[in-house]
């Protein structure tokens, strides 16, 4: 199995969630912003993101 050195970084505010993925713990490979009101809970947000990341 290949080792994954990616790290998920999250900043949750009152309105938005900003999520990013780093490669090797330093370079930001991808980042996106989400409206928290689009999700029923923070868990729902992370489940949605997990499904997209695990392809």
Image: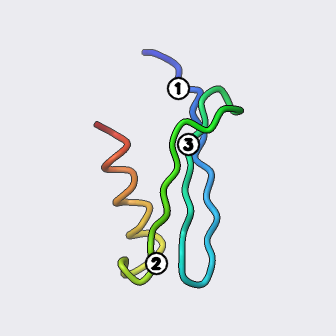
Labels 3 and 1 touching (C-beta < 8 A)? no
| Mark seen at residue 4 | 1
Mark 2 or 1: in front is 2
Q: Nearer the viewer, residue 33 or 46?
A: 33
Q: Is the residue marked by circle 3 packed among few (<14), some (14-19), or many (20+) residues within 10 Å?
A: some
Local secondary structure at mark 2: helix
Q: CA distance from mark 3 to mark 1?
A: 12 Å
Q: CA distance from mark 2 to mark 3?
A: 19 Å
- Which badge, 2 or 3, is on the more N-terminal residue? 3
- Residue for badge 3: 21
| Mark seen at residue 36 | 2
In the picture, residue 44 is in which quadrant?
Answer: bottom left
**Image height of 26 relative to 47, above or below:** above
Residue 1 at x, y percent in the picture:
42, 15
Q: Residue at x 56, y 62 (%)?
A: 18
Residue 38 lies left or right of residue 33; in this view the side is left
Identify the residue at the far right of this view: 26
| Mark seen at residue 54 | none
- Which badge, 3 or 1, is on the more N-terminal residue? 1
Q: Is the residue marked by circle 1 packed among few (<14), some (14-19), or many (20+) residues within 10 Å?
A: few
Labels 2 and 1 touching (C-beta < 8 A)? no
Q: Residue at x 46, y 16 (%)?
A: 2
Query: How did the renderer colour the structure?
Result: rainbow
Residue 12 lies left or right of residue 38; in this view the side is right
Mark 3 or 1: in front is 3
- Which badge, 2 or 1, is on the more N-terminal residue? 1
């Amino acid at each position: 199995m290949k080792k994954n050195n990616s790290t998920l970084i999250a900043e949750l505010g009152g309105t938005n969630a900003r999520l990013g993925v780093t490669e090797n713990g330093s370079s930001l490979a991808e980042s996106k912003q989400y409206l928290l009101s689009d999700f029923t809970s923070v868990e729902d947000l992370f489940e949605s993101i997990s499904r997209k990341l695990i392809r």
